[in-house]
């Protein structure tokens, strides 16, 4: 083991022992750590020397800590501690063991039912944050993670803004990742929670199509398209997406904030209606099966959460060689019904699965 790696593994930060490095960016590094007394693994975020010297980066780091400290929501990464040591600040957070949405999209578009479940979880997290007057302002696939237990975590509130306080940057300056910004962000207009709703719409468009709706050779070109709402309609680039989900995303991406959903809770309600029609299995189970299909979970890991028959039935529904209409395929529904009849705990009653039988026999 190289000496530098040994030094990292023997490093102590408060009550936490560093186990190794998870990743790093231009301004910060994230370690895997362990609270030795209670044996809980955590993620520890530290600003690199360049970040500590940059006042805005340091301010964002503190802002993220304050934002996370106010949240208590299953779909927002939890802050456990803020440790100060040798003039350095460390955020100790919940360790999310799973892939980012960015990684999953790079491997190919997501099914509509999976995307709908992820969307509903993110909308719920945004509703929680907005109620506490916090706007994320940098919602993108890299800031969303799926856990191996079938949950969704929103993270990185580094440029979050408390709407009751002054902005982190001077008025009129765009803050965020260009392709996911709202028209208000690119024009420097006042922001409220609806800016995150627009970004969520962009994220969902990309998840379903595999491509970002707004792109160009320069940030200026991207900004102009966002400002004018110029993008190829989702049903043109992903024709198999069910029309109710297309309409939800289209409304979220309206140029004028007043034409979008009034708040994240309203968007969540629409998504719940869609999911009630399209997803006849446990939402967490659907995500676990999808991660298994994408080989982000082993059979052993997945079967600790789902019964083998249930897992096999749902995984079969992700066969990309077959056309999907957004929910489970008719042939997959047959497998699910058989699994239910075998007592695998898929929560079907006769009244619930009878309509599927009728579809299969048409």
Image (tube, rainbow, N blue to C red):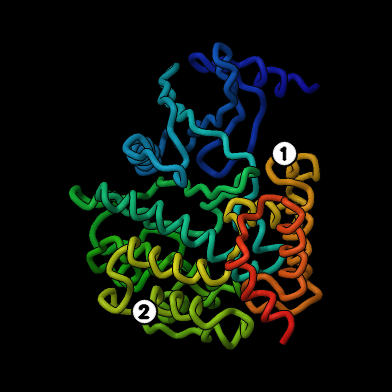
Left or right, 188 with respect to 270, comes to: left
Q: Nearer the viewer, residue 362 or 95?
A: 362
120 or 353, which lies in front?
353
In the image, 214: left or right of 63? Answer: right
For marks 1 and 2 on the same chain, the one whose residue lies earlier in the sequence: 2
In the rendered structure, the answer to whether residue 23 lies left or right of residue 231 reads right
Q: Are marks 1 and 2 in contact (CB under 8 Å)?
A: no
The residue under the point 41% across, 77% down is: 226
Q: Residue at x 33, y 66 (%)?
A: 266
The residues tagged by marks 1 and 2 sit, at their Cα atoms, a distance apart of 42 Å
> What residue is pinned by disc 2?
254
Label 2 neighbour load within 10 Å: few <14, some 14-19, many 20+? many
Label 2: state its secondary structure: loop
Q: Which residue is mark 1?
A: 304
Q: Is residue 66 visible?
A: yes
Query: Which quadrant would the N terminus be assigned to in this image?
Result: top right
User: Is the residue 81 above or below the residue 242 in the image?
Assistant: above
Q: Specify the farthest residue to the top.
A: 37
**x and y percentages locating residue 30 in the rendered image:** 57, 34
Residue 146, x across and y down, in percent: 59, 49
Task: Look at the numbered disc 1 and give the secondary structure of its residue.
Answer: loop
Left-right relation of 284 to 125:
right
The C terminus, quarter of image: bottom right
């Amino acid at each position: 083991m190289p000496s530098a790696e040994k030094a990292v593994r023997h490093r102590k930060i408060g009550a936490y022992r560093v186990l190794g490095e998870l990743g790093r960016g231009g301004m910060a590094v994230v370690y895997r750590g362990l609270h030795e007394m209670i044996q809980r693994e955590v993620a520890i975020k530290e600003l690199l020397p360049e970040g500590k010297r940059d006042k805005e980066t340091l301010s964002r780091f503190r802002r993220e800590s304050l934002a996370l400290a106010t949240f208590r929501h299953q779909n927002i990464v939890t802050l456990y501690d803020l440790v100060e040591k040798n003039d350095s600040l460390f955020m100790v957070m919940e360790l999310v063991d799973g892939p980012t949405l960015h990684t999953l999209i790079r491997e190919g578009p997501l099914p509509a039912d999976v995307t709908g479940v992820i969307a509903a979880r993110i909308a719920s997290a945004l509703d929680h944050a907005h109620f506490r007057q916090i706007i994320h302002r940098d919602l993108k696939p890299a800031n969303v993670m799926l856990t191996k237990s079938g949950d969704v975590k929103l993270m990185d509130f580094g440029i979050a803004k408390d709407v009751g306080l002054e902005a982190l940057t001077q008025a009129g300056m765009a803050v965020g990742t260009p392709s996911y910004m709202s028209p208000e962000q690119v024009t420097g207009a006042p922001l409220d929670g609806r800016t995150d709703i627009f970004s969520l719409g962009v994220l969902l468009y990309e998840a379903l199509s595999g491509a970002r709706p707004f792109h160009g050779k320069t940030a200026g070109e991207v900004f102009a398209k966002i400002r004018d709402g110029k993008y190829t309609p989702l049903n043109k680039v992903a024709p198999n997406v069910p029309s109710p989900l297309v309409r939800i995303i289209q409304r979220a991406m309206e140029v004028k904030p007043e034409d979008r959903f009034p708040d994240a809770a309203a968007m969540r309600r629409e998504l719940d209606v869609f999911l009630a029609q399209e997803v006849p299995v446990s939402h967490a189970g659907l995500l676990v099966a999808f991660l298994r299909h994408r080989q982000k979970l082993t059979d052993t890991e997945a079967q600790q959460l789902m019964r083998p028959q249930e897992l096999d039935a749902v995984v079969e529904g992700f066969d990309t060689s077959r056309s999907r209409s957004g929910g489970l395929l008719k042939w997959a529904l047959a497998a699910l019904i058989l699994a239910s009849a075998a007592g695998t705990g898929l929560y079907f009653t006769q009244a619930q699965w009878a309509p599927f039988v009728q579809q299969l026999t048409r």
